[in-house]
Amino acid sequence: MSILHNAAQVLHLFNAECSDLTVTEASQRLDMPKANASRLLKAMREAGLLEVIGNTRRHRPGKLLLDLAVAYRRSSGLIGRAGEVVAEVTRSFGHTGYVSVLDGREVTAVLDFEGSNSLRVVSNLGRRLQAHQSATGRSLLARLAPDQVAALYAEHPAASDLAAQLEQIRHAGFAYSNQESTPGVEAIGIAVGDPSTQEAVSLCIVYPHTVVDEAARSAIIAALGQGAARIAAQLGDTEFTPPTAIDTGLENKGTAQ
């Protein structure tokens, strides 16, 4: 394998649950000889991709990656517009919000907006989720053609149920998660895209189940939908489906976010 591929594998080890690691840990998790891992991490340090924390032997992502993350977000007009909408809905309802993107069979948040309510869901920016098990992921998967989804989930255990779930989301215009994986947490996700760049993002609000009734859920869906509709109109997203069935009883199961 190339050093570039190996470096990418190291970077994939970092997430919300792993903020730093040693050479030994990288070697074990990548099933790589320790000497090779040591040389690889040294090269990544010299390139600015990694840095050592103080006088320890633990490595974390380098500051160069912060610049790249900012550049990524600023390069996308869609992400910026989506962030404005989610921030507005977060301010209005006080619940935590995310803007997320699809990466294969995973979904990850690229922007987050912490809620202001005393009882709220804590942000978990950087945590990768299985797309078919999340409101954001399912909203994005629903934008794909059925044959694309079938190819993506070929021989996957979730494939048979997923097709029906995505058809419901295409009809309703939103995805909903009702505390299936995270007790007490619900999530709503609405996807919109930019045809000119072939990007798509999911606008998501997460909230504690106990503080939001059906009327409030409908209001959140309507607010997200109106914001997403504005983005779709601005960018010419003809695939966007505005929420028309404000019914969170849909059988869209999965992880919040």
Image: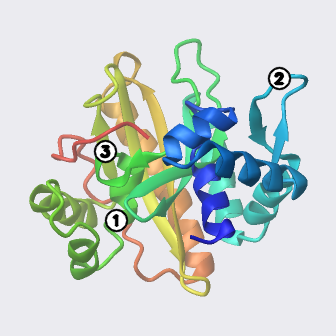
Which is more toward the observer, 122 or 174?
122
Left or right: 109 as drawn, with respect to 91: left
Residue at the disc numbered 3: 176
Could you say which quadrant of the image residue 143 lies in? bottom left
Using the numbered discs, state the Cα–Cα distance from disc 1 to disc 3 in whole angstroms: 13 Å
Front: mark 1 or 3: 1
Which is more toward the observer, 116 or 254?
254
Residue at the disc numbered 2: 56
Q: Mark 2 is on which residue type? A: Thr
| Secondary structure state at the residue bearing disc 2 | loop
Left or right: 99 as drawn, with respect to 214: right
Residue shown at the point (62%, 42%) measured from the top left: 34
Residue shown at the point (68%, 32%) measured from the top left: 22
Question: Residue 141, which numbered label?
Answer: 1
Residue shown at the point (56%, 58%) measured from the top left: 227
First in residue order: circle 1 vs circle 3: 1
Using the numbered discs, state the Cα–Cα distance from disc 3 to disc 2 in whole angstroms: 44 Å
Q: Mark 3 is on which residue type? A: Tyr
